[in-house]
Image (cartoon, rainbow, N blue to C red):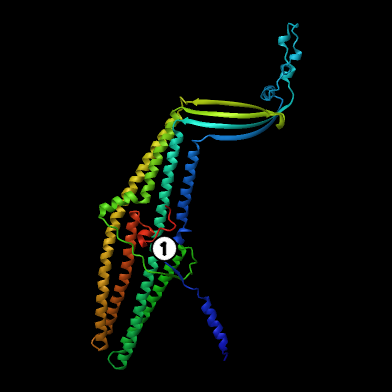
Amino acid sequence: MNRRRPWVSTIAALLAFASVPAAYAIDFAQCVHDAQQRNPEALLAEAQAAEAKGAVSSAQGNLLPKLSASFSGAQSNNALTVFGMKLSQRVATFNDFGAGQFNPSNPAALNIRPNNLDHPGGYHNLGTEISLAIPIWNGGAVRSGISEAQAMLRAAQAGDQYAQQKLIFTVLQAYDGLIAAKSGQEVAEKALHAADAYVKTTHQLLDQGVVVKSDLLSAQVHEEEVALELQQAKNTVANARANLALLVAKPISTPLDVGAAVQPPLPAGDAYALEQQAIANNPGIRALQEKVHAAQAGIGVAHAAYLPHINAMAKQEWNGTTLGNAVPSYTVGGQIQWNLLDFSRSGQMDTAQAKVQAALANLQRAQDDTRLQVQKALLATQLAAQRVKTRELAVRQSEEAQRLVRLRYENGVETLTGLLHGQALLDQSRAELVKARYEEAVERGSLLLAIGKMDLQTLTGAPATGESQ
């Protein structure tokens, strides 16, 4: 027989203990903070808000002058180009016009083609330019574009806030879901403890001749069934823990140790008052309202095509054959441009107006859906609260009834079937109470989400860490 040495067993036990990961304690606020750092939807909403902020800066920049600088070098033998280069360099001479070929005494001199002018040969120019474009008025397109971009920024910020609130609601479901699963496991453990006690009691009664062997077998079968239910409850806890770990960016196998369950407060007010809060405060509704404003500003952008555009410019140039001998020159001016006939403008206006109608339709649909969501959530919350009270009363009644049944069974005046039936009712009542409390928390959270109050400050009284302001 191969016996292990004591020190080998000790080392094996220490290694097995070391392989068990330590519990990771985390409360609800920390869960929300961790989830906000890596949730794809929240990160996408944040990126969209940053993109919209950049669009506002870009639109506002169109109000300001634009200063640009350029440097060019060119070589040409084109007659017009070469003559222009010499003029810009202020080096043109009469000989460039072919003055040497002109003979006043020759009657045909005016018909002679000057070689210096028509065939100047290769010539080059180095040009440096600084230009300033000054917008004055462009039919209101710039102002309307800024209003459109600002409205889209507000829409993106509201969308970011809505994404954060939906994420908090998801974390609430997962967090309280893990607590509910653990409570369900505790119920199953109590049921198994009771089943073990029934098997022991039945053994004693069988030895005393009070019950028959089939009663013991029934108690043992019941014990095995309860053990199976306990294993299922443990699996539910493992799945709930993995779900929460995934949300907070931890390995799925992390043994999360959560705190107390979060019970969202019940908002005050009747259905009408809560509907008004939802329309005013729901960030999803606000985002759609801002999209309506953006679409309306888009009409101003399209209408600018019917109006004149006025702009000014100033330019300073230096031209020469080398950088050292460049000659300066300047140009200032202004331009009024008015497209009097452009058949594409009406289509652009129609498109802008259609976008307004579509944005209004989306807003109306969202408002109607939110009103219905508030109504359903309020009724469900009230029903859930009533169900919790009923389940609490049912547990107390079942516990007392089972206590009396167990006493009668131990005294031989109650059958094992009645005892097991009473225990099953007690286990069911306890499980239903756990489920009812979880459903009440979720329904309250759903109501808070609808009225735009799903945040840490409302849920726990703590500041909304990580949320977009």
Q: Secondary structure at mark 1?
A: helix
User: Dividing the picture into quarters, in which one does residue 74 lie?
Assistant: top right
Read off the residue under disc 1: 29
Q: The N terminus lies in which quarter of the figure?
A: bottom right
Which is nearer the eye, 254 or 93?
93
Residue 134 position in % (x across, y down): 52, 31
The amino acid sitting under disc 1 is: Ala
User: In the image, is 344 to the left or to the right of 123?
Assistant: left
Q: Residue at x 43, y 65 (%)?
A: 244
Q: Residue at x 52, y 26 (%)?
A: 335
Residue 177 position in % (x across, y down): 38, 66
> How many numbered circles does the render carry?
1
Extreme residue toward the bottom, this view: 208
Q: Label 1: few (<14), some or many (≥20) within 10 Å?
A: some
Residue 12 position in % (x across, y down): 55, 82
Q: Residue at x 48, y 50 (%)?
A: 47
Residue 308 position in % (x across, y down): 46, 27
User: Dividing the picture into quarters, in which one does residue 129 lie?
Assistant: top right
User: Dividing the picture into quarters, in which one does residue 430 lie?
Assistant: bottom left
Q: Residue at x 36, y 65 (%)?
A: 262
